[in-house]
Structures are given as C-alpha cells and as structure tokens.
Image (cartoon, rainbow, N blue to C red):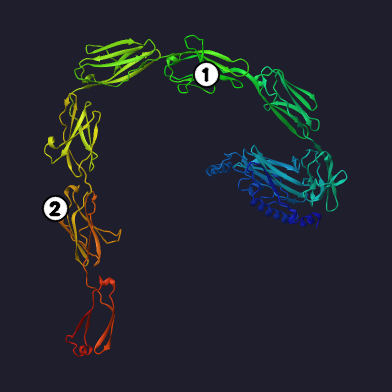
Amino acid sequence: MNAHNQAANNVTPSAILSTHTVSHSEGGEGSSSQQEARGQQEAARGQQEAAGHRSRGHGRGGGLEADGMGQGDLEHLYSEEFPDGAGFSVDQTKVPSSAGEELRRASRDLGLSHYSHTESAPQLRYTPIEQTVTPGDPVSLKCSAVGSPVPVITWTRDHQPLLPSHRTTVGSFRTALGEVVSHVNLSAVTVREGGTYTCTAHNTHGSQAHSARLNVYGPPFVRSMPNVTSVAGEDVHLWCPAGGYPAPTITWRRGSDPLPSSLRQEVFGNGTLVVRTAGHEDAGRYSCVVTGRQGQTAASHTFLHVLKPPVIDNFNLRRSLEEGQRTQLSCTVTEGDLPITINWLKDGRHLQHDPDVESKRTSEFSMVLVLKRLQEHHSGAYTCEAANAAAAVNKTANIRVKVSPKWVVEPSGGTALVGSTVVMACNARGYPQPVITWMKAPGEAARDFQPLVVDGVRSSQAPNGSLFLQETKTSDAGWYLCRAANSVGKPTSKVVQLTVHAPARVVTEGGRVTGHAGQVVTVTCEATGDDPLTLTWLRHHDPVSPGHTVRIRQSEAGGVVRAVLEMVSVTAADAGPYTCRATNPHGAHSQVFQVAVIEPPTAPSGVTVSEVTSRSAVVSWTLPQPAAVTIQYKGVKEESWSGHSRNVSVGQWTASHVLTGLAPHHTYMVRLMAHNDLGVSQPSPTRIFTTTEEAPSGAPRDVRVAAGGPHSLLVTWSALDPLLTHGTLRGYTIAVRRQNLQGHIIYITRPESENVTAFRIQPGGVEQYEVRGLTPATLYEVAVRAFTRAGPGPLSSPRIVDSTSHDAPSCPPAGVSCRGSGRGGVRVWWSPPPTTCAHAAVAGYTITATPTSYAHAHASSKWPTRFILL
C-alpha cells in the first residue's frame, strides 16, 4: 500500500471538520439544520471513497468530481445531478429550446418569477462541505444563492481573493428560476490548493458567507502574510494561512520569543493569534511557524503596525454672526500618529469654489477655514475630517448667518370680483425668520397706511405671509402694503393695489307670484352691479316683448336697477316661469319667478286607492292646476254624503293623502273635490274599497264550565260583540290546562278532532263545546277566544276553574289474602289499588264472603253471600 493509500486509510471522522456559514444582512439566516445534516452524511461518503484511493463527490453537499472528468463532464454532471434546475443553463447545446420554454411556462403556472417581487438580502441555498483529497485529484466546489437584486457570488482562499489559473477555474450562471450558481473547478490539486474556501453572496441589501476547508495530503506550508495596521486600543487578530494535511501544529513568535507571552495574547485552536487592546509596544514582526507530523516545518512573517487615531479639538465658534461680517474655524488635531490629512466639508460635501471662503494649512496637524464676508449661503454644517493610517474622525460645527429679509414671492396687485376669494402673496426669507405685516390705506391714495386687522373668518393671513380675503366686497378695494422685518438690517416692503369689480346680481329672490284670472299681475325685479347694467325679462328663453297686455318699466335709484313686468287681464295661458336676467361686463345673474293664474278649479282626476290596510288607505289624484282638495269618505251602507261623510282637507301642492282611523273589514266610498278662491269643483268619480280584517279585539262572554263526566268538561259561552270581531268569524279556540301547571296549555281549534264535538257558531247565540280525554277528579283552567282570518283575539277573562267528576276504580285491590280468626271470624288483608286506576281518593271497600264447602256442593247454585262495607 503506497503513501497515498495509507493517508486515505488514516482519515477519521474527526478529520472532517464541520462547515460554517456567516450572514451579514438584515434578517439574514445561516445554513439550516437540514443542510448541516446533509453535509455530515456526504462527508461520511467522502471519507469512505477516500479509503478507496480516490475521493469522489456524489452528494449535493460535496464538491469533488470523479477521476478523469473534464470541464464538459463536470457540466454534464451538474445537469444530471441537480434536476431542480440548478444546472439548467450550464450547457445550452444539451437542452432543447422547447424544454426551456416549458420550464418558463411551468414557472408562470406555478406563480414563480425569474425575479423576486420583494427586494431582500441574499440567502445561500447550496454550500460546499469540508473535504480531504489526495494530490492530483480534481475538485469542484459549488455555491448557490437567491435574493433581490440578483446577488453576486465571490470566492476567497485563506481570506485572499481566489484568482483563476491554469488549474483553477471560477464560473457562475443564473437558473431559469433566478438562482445564482457559482462553482470553482480545481484540476490536479496540489497541497498549495488546500486551505479555507469562502463563498460570499452579496447585493445592495446585505451579504451571506459560508466557509469550508479543503484538505490536501502533503507537507505543511504557510502562505505569505500581508502586513497588518491596527488602531491602538483595539483587538488584533493575526490569521495564519497554513496548509498541508494531516493538519500541522501552529505556533507564533515575536522575534525569537514564543507567544503568548502575556495575558493579552491568546492563540485559538485554528491558529489565530489575538492581541487584545493593542498598543505601540505590540508593534513589530510576528512569525507563524507550522510543524508537520513528520517534523517538517514552514514559516511566514507579518509586521504589525499599531497607530493611534486622530483626535480633533473642540471648535471655538462665535454664536452671533450677521451677513457682511467675517469669521474663521480652526481645526486642530491634538492626538494621533502622523502623517495626518485634514479636509473641510460643508453639508457633507467638499468645499465649492467661493472667493469669500479660504482654507489654510497652518501646520501638519491643524487647518484654518476663513470666511471673509458672510452671506446667506454660508449657513450650514462645516465638518473637519482628519485621517491617518489608523482611522478617520470628524467634528462638525453649525454656522447660521443672520440675514436681513429678502423676497421669496414679491407682492403684486390684481383684480377680483365681488364674492370671490383673493390671495395676495407675500413671502420673505431671512434669519431670524421675518415677520410679515399687512397694512391698508384708508382712502383712495397710497398713503397713511394703517395695520390691517384680520378676523380669521373672512380675512386671514397664512403662515407664509399671504393674505386671504373671502367673499370679497367692493370695500376691500384699495392700496395694500406688505412689510417683512426681522432683527437684521432694514425692513423691506412693497405697495400693491387691489381692484374689486361687482358683477351683475339680481337681489330680488325668485318665487311664486299668484293672480286671479282677468286681473293684473305685477312682477318686480331689482339688481346691482357695475355699470353698464342691463335687466331683461325672458319667457321660455326668449325676451318678453311689451304689448297691449304686457308692460315693462325700468328705473334706477341708489345703485339699484329695477325692472317691473305688468301683465293685464291674465289667463291660464300667461302662467309659467318668467326669468329676470341682469348682465354687465363682469358677469350675469338670473332669478326665476313662477307666475300662477287662479281659475275656478276642475274636479280631480285619476283618483286611486292603494296600500289598503285594516285601519288606513292611500288616496292619490291629479289636478290640471294647483288647488286645495277636500276628500270625502263614508261607509257603503250609509245613505247620504251630507249627513254621514267625513271630510279631510289637503293643501294645493299635494297629490296623495293617507286616510287613517278606518274600521277593519269595512267597505267605504271616497270622492274628491278641488277648491280655490274662486269656488269648488264638482265631485270626482266615486271609488269603493274595503279594509282588511284584524284579529278580534274582544273575548267571548259569559264563559261557563261544567263537568261532562269523569273524562270531560262541557264549556259554554256567548258570542263576542260584533263590533269587536273586525272580520268574518272563523271559529273559536279553547285553552285548557291543569291548574297550577304553568305553561302546559292545550289549544283546541279543530272541531273534527276525535275528542271534541262540532262547534255551533250562531251569531248572538250560546256556543257549546265538550273537551274530552281529561283526567278524572282534576281541577282545570279553561279560557275561550275567537279568531278570524287575521288571527286569534284575546282569551276570555277571568278564566273559569272547575273539576271533572269522579269515576269508579278501574282495577281491584291487590294482594288479597285471609285467615280464620276463630269463633267464625275471618281476617282479610289487601293493598289499595294504584292511583293510576283509582282516579280519586278511595272512599271505602266492599268485602264479599262465601263458604267454600257450600260452593263445592252447590256448584251450579247461587252462592249465599255476605257483604261487608268498610
């Protein structure tokens, strides 16, 4: 067995270290427990295959390829071994176009997308595991991730970027479902390819990393180590990039002294040296020495620089600065290793060219910023940034320059219409914030301005200084002055003029104008507004022309124009809407007057009765002209309208009315008459309707109950008052229950029942009903009520209580026995009969005695019997 085989046989489970995943993101997660378990299983398989002279990776957690496979074979293995699409686009020539189209269509059908709709940090879906191989073997490492935006996967070996070479190939692709797959292919590995491999997936939302070690049998070695610069006071971690397998022993030296040499120094199990709270005394050369099991050694060196970060002294800044003044800021670095670079920033950006701003380097650790002439744009946050090889620090001072008011929106005049809303803009900036004040001249000249009083309702001032005038009046016209002032410099102000125009407006409210036929109807209309103002009368959108029956008079007084329309000998044809329209150059306004001509009314037509109930009905009608209406109604059996009808008056603008207070199941006649100031119309055609039934409102009278036998009661009553029936009487209901049994009521309403006799319904007569099937000698409560088609009425009150008669026991005493008592006597024993067949309390017993010998001798003769009553 050669050395390789011996090394393979020496592989133990403890040599396969567990992998680890590191995530740097908001809400990022590491590898799942399922993936770790899968990795352990695949590591075990890798161990078994290493014992067979070759390490072959057939598990999804493994990354080794079969012996003798080339690049194309590796890609083919991906497509066969990962049927979920992880290797779908590795070799386009091997996948038909129809298959890709089917996959995309299936993704759509499943609700999947090539791109995530919600952006998220990367998540690793597939990661490599630790492996141990022999030199010359091919190795493939795979890592896949998802995220949005699409993540980028990079590889490092021993914390250094992994660069392609003639034996190292790095590639990546994206599957149809948006998963990024990256792989590292190593052909004919050497011991120098061994080390810790890390794949990192990152996008704009974060990153996630996973590390796994590749062990290659061979002597120990240490890669070159870069120099390390650290900040004083922080912990330093020195990594030893050692390789070779079996894993060598790692030790550290500083110069010729072994480490650790103090409590601040510690060497971890993976060979990392930690120097805690590093200071200048810890700077120097550090050596990592590795020793193999056969005594081979290798070493590498690094130089540790420990630098002190800069410290900036506090600024000395004058608080009250006004425009036109000058000032300076001095940035002094009191601590920190040289060289130190110092820069000034304003509002987080480098200083722009400004002739009034100059920065001067006064020494290698200080710089002065000079502001020669302060202006408004010099206000802001000034930051001094100092940096050396250890760290970069900064300190910020805020400068606020006091500035006199300057217009942001300069006031301007304008025109407005009466009733409109006016906004007069006036906005100024400065520091402190200027106070805006509005003033108004009392006369027509722009002088003697007085402060404007705003009431917060019709007039108000916005926070930015603009003046709001609502429902503008002509008195609002005039000269206004807007003044902006603060504690810096002189106030600024401007005078503007507001002109208010009054559009034409009809001030007479439109409405109804009524006149009698043949008389004169006058309609007056008044309007206001700027001249020239014109009033016009319109009917059906056409101007009304004066004539022998129509006159129009117009006059003006006190700024009000009046137009009077007179119509002589009006008729029904003159009725209708008339429009008074006022116009001037600034607008138009109208009011409508409804002229009604009263004539003797005609009878209402289209009289209908609807929504009839037991107590009400709706009467509807139509009229050719407005008129009041009188509704007359009476019972059909009542002969004349004059003595028996009831009248209801309804206003002239009503077309229907609800009649109330009607009697149930009653037939009525109804007619209507119209009337106005000129008289009363003829009655309309008569309509007949019948109200619906109601349940009776009274109970049967004189209810009596008597025992009809041991099992029945005889109930009699007199019919209820016909006025309380409210419909056609359909029958009676008898309620029966045993006394003191609340809720157990029997209602009997069907005469054909086997336990009842037929009802005899005779108006005004006496009704009789026999209730059967009752318990003998029992007290019952009985009540009666009548019912119509609409339902039952109330039960009779008071309820009558009576008792059924007694019945003879239906079974004999039980357990009868006898015994002679001497001297011709006999003692008899028995048990009372059950209460279910006694029907009542037992009043006594009868004993019948017959001699036995006599009975045998005279079997056919009648027994001599003795009766004893107890």
The residue labelled by disc 1 is 425
Give percent across and percent down for residue 467: 50, 19
In the picture as drawn, the residue positioned furthest to the left comes out as: 639
Q: Residues within 10 Å of mark 1 (few under 14, many from 20)?
A: some
The answer to whether one can see residue 187 in this image is no
In front: 747, or 607?
747
Please state the horizontal and vertical placement of residue 856, each as a whole percent of the image.
21, 89
Query: Hey, what amino acid is under mark 2?
Result: Gly
Res. 36 visible in picture: yes
Q: Locate residue 473: give its quadrant.
A: top left
Residue 507: percent from left, percent from top: 34, 17
Q: CA distance from mark 2 to mark 1?
A: 94 Å
Residue under numbered circle 2: 764
Could you tell me which quadrant the N terminus lies in?
A: bottom right
User: In the image shown, does 848 or 682 lie closer to the viewer?
Assistant: 848
Pick the residue in front: 154 or 49: 154
